[in-house]
């Protein structure tokens, strides 16, 4: 183990970081070992990573000194922030600064910054097709990440910007799964019209990130977008119907209706889907399936992901 290069992984007990720790530790003969970063090293999730052989260390992205300690001696660092834990883009920017500075001070050789588009480059604040949120954002959980690409560049850390995609796991964990309509038929509800949405099995993000670390310096200074498939709402509904063995409709609604659902973040997500719909070509082109498969030969299709997860999807 001593001769292995350490990859320090934020969000290690979560979807993206967890997938990366599992990918690193599954490759026993590979050049890397994982250092799992968590706020609570004795949690069951952290202990499950320790059981795989990962080193587990305590740090908080809001505590710069803890991050500096956690990145010390690491060859690589996977940097992700947790918008939905606080829903504050300014805090996400501060966390990105903490991550970039910690990586710089620890002289990390390769950082992956888990990012998304700054949608204001597609939809300026003056564009009233969707509301401006928080005074200066269109899609706060995208825009802060995209803005933070510049923070890593300005800090001069050797970075690959990894543009992630909509997790299909949102159908399990984010309340987006099929729900029964008045006639009892299941339906998924999305404001995507006939446009394709770039989606991915969350576990595959970590596997793609592992591919980025393996490729190393070829990808430093580059932006790499990943997705498992680009699918319309109708295609996803058909996938559900096939997997569940019962009819599932696609309930296409407007972004305005989605924003009006009123749950925390509904306006942010309504704007996100509107960008995905109105800029379908750019959003899908930025997430190449071929590049994703080259990084991660085990990349799942939606049907494969459904096959492994259909029992976990809550049907209301
Ligand atoms: N859902 C989607 O479709 C989607 C798509 C693309 C991008 N994203 C982005 O993905 C990001 C979240 O990544 P994820 O889904 O992998 O996260 P996740 O599964 O929600 O969990 C991430 C882990 O982060 C840790 N964490 C939370 N706050 C922390 C802090 N202050 N310091 C250190 N660790 C902290 C927690 O671990 P401990 O409790 O062990 O500390 C948690 O287990 C969000 O910013 C979101 O915008 C989501």
Image (spheres, rainbow, N blue to C red):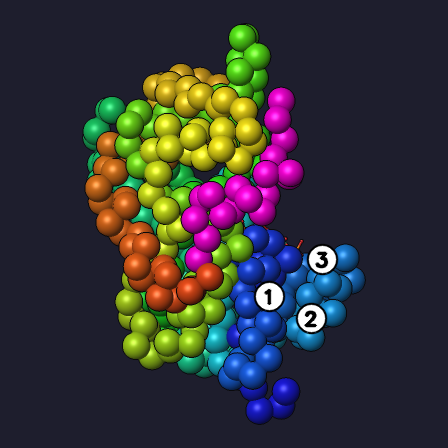
Quadrant into which the N terminus falls: bottom right
Ranked by sequence position, the earlier of labels 3 and 1 is 1
Of residues 254 and 307, the one nearer the viewer is: 307
Secondary structure beneath label 3: helix
Whether the residues at callouts 3 and 1 have beta carbons within 8 Å, the answer is no
Q: Residue at x 49, y 48 (%)?
A: 304
Mark 3 and mark 2 in contact? Answer it, CB < 8 Å. no
The magenta stretch is 299-316
- Mark 3, ligand 1, within 8 Å: the answer is yes
Q: On the picture, is 282 further left or further right than 252?
A: left
**Could you tell me if residue 243 is visible in this image?**
yes
Front residue (pair 312, 197): 312
Outermost bottom residue:
3
Kindly identify which numbered label has been placed on residue 22: 1
Could you tell me which residue is drawn at 68 percent across and 59 percent down?
39
Residue 259 percent location from the top left of the image: 42, 22
Q: Position of residue 289 (x, y in %)?
A: 32, 54
Q: Nearer the viewer, mark 3 or mark 2?
A: 2
Q: Is residue 166 above or below residue 260?
A: below
Please name whichever residue, 275 or 22, is drawn nearer the observer in this view of the structure. 22
Alpha carbons under labels 3 and 1: distance apart? 12 Å
Residue 226 in the figure: left or right of residue 315: left
Is residue 2 depicted above or below 299 in this figure? below
Q: Crowding at label 3, few (<14), some or many (≥20) Cα neighbours within 10 Å?
A: some
Up the image or down, 118 lies above or below 217; here it is above
Outermost residue toward the top in this view: 182
State the separation of the CA atoms marked 3 and 2.
Answer: 11 Å
Residue hosting label 2: 52
């Amino acid at each position: 183990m001593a001769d292995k290069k350490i990859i320090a992984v934020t969000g290690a007990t979560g979807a993206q970081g967890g997938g990366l720790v599992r990918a690193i530790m599954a490759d026993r003969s590979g050049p890397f070992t994982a250092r799992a970063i968590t706020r609570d090293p004795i949690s069951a999730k952290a202990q499950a990573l320790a059981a795989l052989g990962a080193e587990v260390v305590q740090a908080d992205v809001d505590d710069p000194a803890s991050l500096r300690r956690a990145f010390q001696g690491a060859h690589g660092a996977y940097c992700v922030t947790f918008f939905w834990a606080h829903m504050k883009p300014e805090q996400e920017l501060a966390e990105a600064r903490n991550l970039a500075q910690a990586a710089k001070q620890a002289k990390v050789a390769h950082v992956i910054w888990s990012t998304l588009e700054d949608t204001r480059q597609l939809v300026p604040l003056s564009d009233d097709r969707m509301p401006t949120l928080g005074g200066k954002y269109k899609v706060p959980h995208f825009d802060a990440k995209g803005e933070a690409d510049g923070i890593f560049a300005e800090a001069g850390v050797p970075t690959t910007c990894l543009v992630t995609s909509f997790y299909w796991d949102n159908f399990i964990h984010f309340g987006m799964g099929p729900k029964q309509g008045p006639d009892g038929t299941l339906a998924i509800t999305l404001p995507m019209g006939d446009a394709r949405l770039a989606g991915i099995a969350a576990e595959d993000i970590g596997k793609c990130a592992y591919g980025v670390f393996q490729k190393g310096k070829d990808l430093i200074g580059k932006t790499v977008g990943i997705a498992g498939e680009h699918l319309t709402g109708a295609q996803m509904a058909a996938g559900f119907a096939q997997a569940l063995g019962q009819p599932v409709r696609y309930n296409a609604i407007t972004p305005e209706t989605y924003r009006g659902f009123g749950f925390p973040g509904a306006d942010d997500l309504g704007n996100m889907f509107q960008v995905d719909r109105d800029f379908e070509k750019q959003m899908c082109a930025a997430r190449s399936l071929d590049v994703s498969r080259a990084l991660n030969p085990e990349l799942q299709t939606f049907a494969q992901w459904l096959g492994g997860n259909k029992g976990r999807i809550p049907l209301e």
